[in-house]
Amino acid sequence: MKLGARKTILLGIASAVVLTTAGCGGGLLSSGDSGSTAASGPIKIGMVVPISGSSAPTGAYMKNGAQLAVDEINKAGGVLKGRKLELMVEDEACDAQQAVASANKVVSAGAVVSVGGYCSGATLPTLPIFQKANIPMIIPAANSQDLVKQGLANVFMINGTGKQQSTTALAFMKKSGFATVALVDDNTSYSKDITTETQAQIDKDGSVKVLLNTSVTAGESDYSAVVRNIMGKNPALVYWTGYYQEGGLIINQLKKAGFTGKIMVADGSVDPSLAKIAGAGAEGVFATMTQTPDTIKGAEKWIANYKAKFSSDPGPYSTQSYDAVRLAAKAIEDAGSTKGADIIKALTAIDGFSMFSGPLKFTPEHTLSSGGFVILVIKDGKFVLNSVQP
Amino acid sequence: MTQLIWDGLFVGSFYALIALGYSMVYGIIKLLNFAHGDIYMLGAFIGFALLTSMGGIPASLSLGALLLVLLASMLLTGTAGVIIERLAYRPLRGAPRLAVLITAVGVSFSLEYGVSAVAGPNPRAFPVRLEGGVFDVLGARVSLPQIVLMLIAAGLMIALNSYIQKTSTGRAMRSIALDTNASLLMGINVNAVITRTFFIGSALAGAAGVMAGAYYGKIDFLMGFIIGLKAFTAAVIGGIGNIKGAMLGGLVLGFVEAFGTEWFGGQWRDVFAFAVLILFLTLRPTGILGERVTERM
């Protein structure tokens, strides 16, 4: 069938219009409530966590913790009169572009709540995506102040914030008598946030002195420059606020260079691999961290359940992810619907919901009222609760 | 100050080892093998696999085991380089240079994500770590592992240089680099020599990979990417296609980075390194030891 040029163009336009309107029904182009407003069927819960890349192990713990909660809730009858929860996990790979693509996937699949978010640098750009779709976010791990500063109504953080971590760090420094400190970050949102906040709090307090506040580039092997710098200034404590790959290398190279002071890492470096990479220098390294399953009193039964289901030990942020899903289910139940606006209202109104980090009541900024940070120390290659707590 | 120079020299020798492979391949078939950095990563992972399969090694034998694994890894990585040449580059021998360049990028990605699929995306700790005595030399803290590694690197580079200058294969390499068609007419088996070039270049990168794994202790599937870029920079600085230039370029880049990070701070390291690359490409593209080659029509 030979069409003239004009007819071809008209046919093309017509088919484009038809296809667009057909796809428009509930797909990407619809804004507002993208949640499944259907009255029945499974309720999708989206989770954007690192599945690949260097933070992949933590992503696995978070996914498993959330799945544990989903299975428990479904076994107990689901929410909203028997509707089952369905966990949809996508990869953020601790990379902003990847996280944005995954967030879009989650939104267009019809998720009602988001319970993911580990790397703050990757989570930050997904905030406007979920906000535009009016999907509440319960963030179990990412805790940079940048997330709080956005001030978005749909964002709730159930991990201690960078500010609260800095407060704990400073309190520990004072209690242990570290008079001088060097702050080292890896130039990402989460990391820089902690060093900036710690520096600000230290300056205000006045009893500790910051000798050095510097950054390194992540992803390299050779950190001789920062090691030289630290050795030159010779602080009593080095506070590393980046992730465990670089942290392990820096600890190892500091030990090789003969550093005699102590080292403390922030919660992003708390991972069993830190000790493996750091080698002999890992012994005695401190960490500011929110409660992990093995440091929470009374979590033994939960740990046993996790082990039975996933045949491995739970790791950092598995309890927070578990609580995030439970919180989401409670909010949906309280709201009585899957509409984003209702769930957000229900979350803001929650008072005294029991979680592993204590009874929950959100502050006006949608963060935890108390950070729940403790000090861990590496003994025999594993993180355990330190004897001295601030 | 001496600490700076020593640190620069140490990092520079890694860059030099890998830049050698770059320069050799460019010199002989005018191909910028962007997959070369990933050959370095492959070498590190092969070394890791060999060492873990050997089981527990007592500390006294660790250096010996490491040298053995180094040789084995060099052989295996060299073979991998030959296979890559045969599969990816030889079919494109007559194609426009852009096509081969794109293929090289493709090989780079395949290697990276292939290793990630096989060995997992998480970084691994190298089972044998080099620990050793530390000496104070003129104010710089010098450790025995650093000296050993630099000696190995220097030894490999000297061996390569004498190979290129004194053996007939080396002469063949140099003549192919000058004029491929004339070499063919002279009866040189061009294909065999190119294969040998890839083998040697990849073996050197593999050696650097194992040494980096043993010294720094951590390997991951993306470690070759940035090192490949730095080695390319080093090769350009020294004069791409020139063996001695690659060695010099590596050391120069090591110094540039050490001094740059000292003056500006750790986060400026890559900025400094690549700014120097841009500077060289704009002002002196032939590099320090390169010469402008006139083409007679």
Image: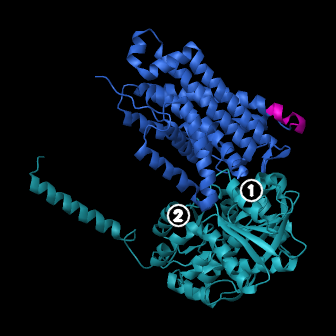
Chain colours: A cyan, B blue
Q: At label 1, which amino acid type do we have? A: Gly
Q: Which chain's residue wears label 2?
A: A
Q: Does the segment drawn in magenta span residue B63?
A: yes
The structure residue drawn at horizontal position 19% and vertical position 58%, both measured from the top left corner, is A12
* SS type, badge 1: helix
- Residue A6 located left or right of residue A290: left
Q: Earlier in the sequence, mark 2 or mark 1?
A: 2
Which of A292/B187 is in front? B187
Q: Residue A82 appears in which quarter of the rendering?
A: bottom right
How packed mark 1 is, by other alpha carbons closer than 10 Å (few <14, some 14-19, many 20 or more), is many
Horizontal and vertical percent for residue A22?
A: 31, 66
- Residue B218 located left or right of residue B253: right
Which of B26/B41 is in front? B26
Residue with the mark numbered 2: A96
Q: At label 2, which amino acid type do we have? A: Ala
Horizontal and vertical percent for residue A76?
A: 70, 74
Horizontal and vertical percent for residue B87?
A: 49, 27
On screen, residue A93 above or below A30: above
**What's the CA distance linking mark 2 and mark 1?**
24 Å
Q: Residue B36 appears in which quarter of the rendering?
A: top right
Horizontal and vertical percent for residue A99?
A: 53, 64
The structure residue drawn at horizontal position 66% and vertical position 38%, both measured from the top left corner, is B209
- Residue A194 visible here: yes
* SS type, badge 2: helix
- Residue B115 located left or right of residue A240: left
On screen, residue A147 above or below A62: below
Residue with the mark numbered 1: A248
On screen, residue B168 above or below A326: above
Residue stretch in magenta: B57-65
- Residue A21 located left or right of residue A204: left
Dots 2 and 1 on the same chain: yes
Q: Residue B94 appears in which quarter of the rendering?
A: top left
